[in-house]
Amino acid sequence: MKKLTFYLSIIFINLSCSVTKTALLVNPETGERVTATFKDSAATGGTCQATMSDGEILTGMYSGVRGTDIISFGSTNGNISVNSNYKSRGQNVLSSETNANYSATGATRTVGGQGKAKALLYSTKPGSKLTMELIVIYNVLGGGGYGDAKTNDGRTYKVIIQ
């Protein structure tokens, strides 16, 4: 069975929401078009359903791996000393001296970049053994992506996620 590349991007508002994305699959040899929908769960995965050109429904699951999600921590500290003596220049200004200590800590999180996902679908039609595998790359923040798909009977598709 050939692999399909599938790109999917999902933005999580909170853990209880789900996002639905639509993908168009096109067979470059025959022009056959298939529509697929991906419904995200509260993680990088969920359910997928594709409607074949003859009306047969394929259903299954997909799982994704996000490529860029970095958390960094840092800290710094030091001492600042300032001594200004204006009297030595003949000015009628008081001398001043300042000493200060400082410290800071911080954390950053970088989210975005590219993710990868794979979907495995099977037919809901009684007696049908049709399956499809999709493999995609997706934009973690933007929601779009692309990839390839193939059925177990040899049909291949190019995938665009909207």
Image: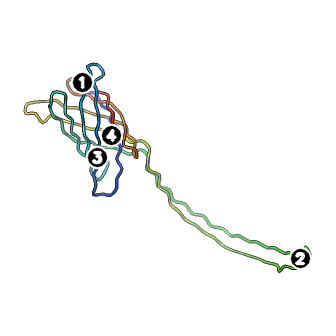
Left or right of 130 on screen, residue 142? right
- Quadrant position of residue 20: top left
Quarter holding the C terminus? top left
Q: Which mark is residue 91?
A: 2
- Going from N to C along the chain, the mark reached first, 4 or 2, is 2
The residue labelled by disc 4 is 117
Check residue 45 in the rendering and tell me which mark sits there, or answer none. 3
Towards the viewer: 29 or 66 = 29
Furthest residue toward top: 29
Cβ atoms under marks 4 and 3 closer than 8 Å: yes
How many residues crowd around disc 1 within 10 Å: few (fewer than 14), some, or many (20 or more)? some
Amino acid at pointer 3: Gly
State the SS at label 2: loop
The answer for how far apart the CA atoms under marks 4 and 3 are is 8 Å
Q: Are marks 2 and 3 in contact (CB under 8 Å)?
A: no
Spatial CA span between label 4 and label 2: 73 Å
**What's the distance in space between the residues labelled 2 and 1, CA to CA?**
89 Å
